[in-house]
């Protein structure tokens, strides 16, 4: 009798789960990545992750928009550890006219994702320990080169302006976009 009761309960639950209406043919559903996955976790106590560091910065609105357009928000909100070279809005403004608008188009999502992945390395790298001319592998499969000019540190041609520690890595604020 108990097996029959359990089987009936499971069948009822499965039937109830299947009664949710599916979208009609041709109807689309939307997924707001800011409300899904690891990026949606609300935590006002811990240090912010690398995405929340960018979201909380008035100088990184373009980077945040690009991360959303490339569907990389949840990837970078995960455990990491990540080293992120975060171009400022002013860095994006240095790109040739129309380049950013073109990259943000849905049909260029893959190209945009590749450029953004050129700004990410695993694991956390302390640039103070890198030697002049040393190269670092980045997420797009390429490499970036570190240089020192006096007391300043550069990744590619972008100057490292600031360092922000995050719960899942480190964010280096840079004054240029690293183009693969």
Image: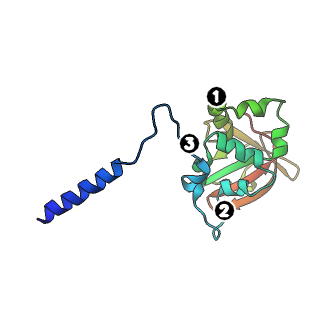
Residue at left 58%, top 53%? 35
Q: Quadrant of the N terminus?
A: bottom left
Residue that badge 1 annotates: 107
Residue that badge 2 annotates: 48
**CB of mark 3 within 8 Å of CB of mark 1?**
no
- Reply above or below: 178 against 75: above
Foreground tag (3 vs 1): 3
Q: CA distance from mark 1 to mark 2?
A: 31 Å
Residue that badge 3 annotates: 30
Q: CA distance from mark 3 to mark 2?
A: 27 Å
SS for tag 2? loop
SS for tag 3? loop
Q: Quadrant of the C terminus?
A: top right
Q: Is residue 77 visible?
A: yes
Q: CA distance from mark 3 to mark 1?
A: 17 Å
First along the sequence among labels 3 and 2: 3
Foreground tag (3 vs 2): 3
Residue 136 percent coordinates (x, y): 67, 43
Residue 111, quarter of picture: top right
Identify which residue, 17 or 111, lies in the foreground: 17
């Amino acid at each position: 009798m108990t097996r029959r009761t359990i089987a009936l309960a499971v069948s009822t639950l499965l039937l109830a789960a299947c009664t949710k209406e599916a979208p009609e043919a041709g109807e689309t559903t939307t997924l707001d990545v800011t409300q899904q996955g690891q990026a949606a976790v609300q935590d006002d106590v811990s240090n912010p992750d690398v995405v929340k560091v960018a979201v909380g910065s008035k100088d990184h609105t373009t980077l945040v928009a690009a991360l959303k357009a490339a569907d990389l928000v949840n990837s970078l909100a995960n455990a990491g550890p990540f080293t992120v070279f975060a171009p400022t809005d002013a860095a994006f403004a240095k790109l040739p006219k129309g380049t950013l608008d073109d990259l943000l188009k849905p049909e260029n999502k893959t190209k945009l994702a590749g450029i953004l992945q050129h700004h990410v390395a695993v694991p956390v790298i302390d640039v103070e320990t890198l030697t002049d001319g040393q190269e670092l592998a980045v997420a797009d499969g390429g490499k970036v080169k570190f240089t020192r000019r006096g007391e300043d540190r550069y990744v590619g041609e972008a100057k490292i302006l600031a360092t922000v520690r995050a719960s899942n890595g480190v964010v280096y604020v840079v004054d240029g976009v690293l183009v693969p």
